[in-house]
Every structure is written in C-alpha cells, then in structure tokens.
C-alpha cells in the first residue's frame, strides 16, 4: 500500500513539474517567447507568430490572483518586476474576444 502511494505521488509531482515546459519542437507553435526565466528585475515578452494588437496579456500569481493586465499589447514588451514578489507566476495570452490562446509560467527569483 505504501509503495503504490509513493509511486502515485511521484507520478503526480513529476506531471506537475512538466506543466508549462516546452521542447524545442513545441517552441515554434508558441505565440510568445519570454525570457529570462527565472527573472529578477525584468522579463521580456516577444511575439513569435500571429501578432495582433488586440491581444491582452494577463499575469496571475500562484494563488490565482490577477496581478497585471495589459490590453492591446505591443509586439515586444519589457515588464519591470519591481512591484512583483518572488515566486511562480502564470501568464495568459487572450484574443480580443477574451479567448485564451496560450498560457505558461515563469519564476521570479529576487
């Protein structure tokens, strides 16, 4: 019983750790490239494909609270992290109708 629980726990944790990670092949299908990750003072968001000025970028903290939103995003954006705390953040790219096109995560290490 203990060993099956451990295996289940290990599989769940490994699955959660891989969420948001992409391989080189998957990177070409992404709308946004973000770097550096982990970030400390700023993070860059660059569109790789399908740029539209009607897109919105939302950033949520790990608890799910929206901490940043920009509508009508520019094709290249440098976001200062001076008002952000250390931790894991989730970004969402949404089109002008509010439909989510892409989601990912990044880390702030101060």
Image (cartoon, rainbow, N blue to C red):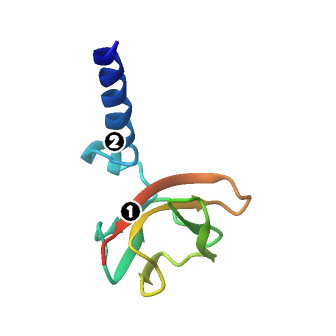
Q: Position of residue 109 (x, y in %)?
A: 30, 72
Q: Residue furthest right?
A: 97
Q: Position of residue 54 (x, y in %)?
A: 65, 69
Question: Mark 1 and mark 2: span between their CA atoms?
Answer: 13 Å
- Can you say which quadrant of the picture contains the C terminus? bottom left
Q: Residue at x 61, y 65 (%)?
A: 65
User: Which quadrant holds residue 10?
Assistant: top left
- Can you say which quadrant of the picture contains the N terminus? top left
Q: Secondary structure at mark 2?
A: helix
Q: Nearer the viewer, residue 2 or 40?
A: 2
- Which disc number belongs to residue 18? 2
User: Can I make out residue 49 in this image?
Assistant: yes
Q: Position of residue 67 (x, y in %)?
A: 58, 73
Query: Label 1, on which residue?
Result: 106
- Which disc number belongs to residue 2? none
Q: Secondary structure at mark 1?
A: strand
User: Can I make out residue 52 in this image?
Assistant: no
N-terminal of the pair, mark 1 or mark 2, is: 2
Q: Residue furthest front?
A: 2
User: Which quadrant holds residue 80?
Assistant: bottom left
Relative side of 6 to 67, left or right: left
């Amino acid at each position: 019983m203990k060993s099956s629980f451990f295996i289940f726990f290990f599989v769940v944790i490994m699955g959660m750790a891989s969420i948001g990670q992409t391989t080189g092949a998957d990177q070409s299908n992404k709308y946004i490239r973000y770097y550096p990750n982990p970030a400390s003072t700023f993070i860059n968001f660059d569109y790789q494909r399908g740029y539209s000025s009607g897109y919105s970028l939302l950033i949520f903290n790990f608890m799910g609270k929206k901490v940043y939103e920009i509508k009508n995003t520019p094709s290249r954006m440098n976001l200062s992290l001076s008002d952000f705390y250390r931790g894991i953040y989730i970004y969402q790219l949404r089109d002008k109708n509010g439909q989510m096109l892409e989601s990912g995560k990044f880390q702030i290490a101060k």
